Image (spheres, helix red, strand yellow):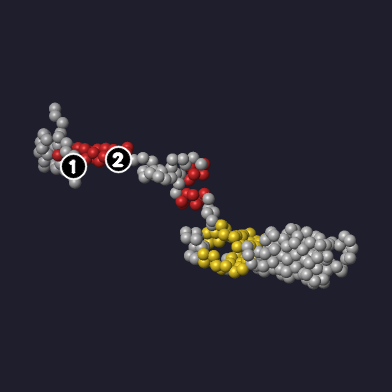
Amino acid sequence: MADLPETNQWTPGVYQIETSDPVVGGPEGVTNLPIKQLSNRTVWLKGKFESLKIIADKVIQATERAAGIARIATQAAVKAGTETGTTVTPKHLASLFPFRGCAVFSEPEMYTWKVPSGVTQAWVVVIGAGGGGARSITLPGPSGGSGGGIARKLVDLRGVTTVDITVGAGGKGATELDTTGGAGGASFFGNFVYATEGLGGRLDGKASHGGSGYNGDENDSIGAAGHPLGGAQSPNFVGGAGGGGESPPSWDDSRKPVTPGQGGGGRGGSAAPDGADGRVTIQW
């Protein structure tokens, strides 16, 4: 019994034996024709598969210096730190580590921020400037300036190319006796989110509330101003703390707080500190 001869070719179709066909065997017999056509297809496919295997056996794993096959790491492998020998795609990396850049605006000024290519979201923190402290040596004494507001928001930047930014300036502390402090300036990240300013120190026995954040996912205040402590013209008399607490109750301390949005304390023996400037931070 002989085997059917096989040819390495792709037969376009497979013959259907009809009821009128005679039963004829042999290499050219109509009964063996569909079997022969399928056998030819099998030989053709086997040759293609072996050719691809030969190529695959010669290809090496791609590296930074050599071309080759790149096996893509899974997100789970990247997160677990087991992606050695594989290629990490920017999409996987971005999904695990969303913050690829940061911009900080801390000088009181107006800016235009250009949205980086491919950035569709950014985490934004906006802080309003603090108020300056008041100055007095008479009752009821000088209060500190209040702190600015603070707002945090994940901003949708799809379709946005630039954003106007404003950083508020700290309010001026009083330099002359019996003078109130100046209010700070509000800070803005376009029309998306903003934080209002802290108010200046007072001389009426009251202390101002702090500014507030608006339109954020989180809206807070750096803090209210502090009231003066002790009796006027007393060795223990001190001006109230600035909002936020960095500028503490004191008689003689004109240092401006450095933490964004903090208020300057009230003073008697020296000029009162200015409030700290605001800040806008963008992470993407």
* Residue depicted at x 51% and y 44%: 79
> Residue at label 1?
9
* Residue depicted at x 55% and y 61%: 155
- Helix, strand or loop at label 1? It is loop
Q: Position of residue 164 (x, y in %)?
A: 56, 68
Left or right? Give the position of 33 relative to 59.
Answer: left
* Numbered label tally: 2
Q: Position of residue 92 (x, y in %)?
A: 47, 49
* Residue depicted at x 51% and y 41%: 81
Answer whether residue 122 is visible to the viewer in this image: yes
Q: Which mark is residue 59?
A: none
Quadrant (top left, top right, bottom left, bottom right) of the C terminus: bottom right
Camera-side residue of 115 and 221? 115
Mark 2 neighbour density, 10 Å: few (under 14) some (14–19) many (20 or more): few
> Residue at label 2?
55
Answer whether residue 200 is visible to the viewer in this image: no
* Residue depicted at x 56% and y 57%: 102
CA separation in Å, label 1 and label 2: 21 Å
* Residue 153 falls in image quadrant: bottom right
Query: Which sits earlier in the primary sequence, circle 1 or circle 2?
Result: 1
Q: Position of residue 197 (x, y in %)?
A: 68, 67
Q: What residue type is disc 2 on?
A: Ile
Quadrant (top left, top right, bottom left, bottom right) of the N terminus: top left
* Residue 101 falls in image quadrant: bottom right
Identity of the residue furthest to the top in this view: 1
Q: What residue type is disc 1 on?
A: Gln
- Helix, strand or loop at label 2? It is helix
Left or right? Give the position of 2 relative to 52.
Answer: left
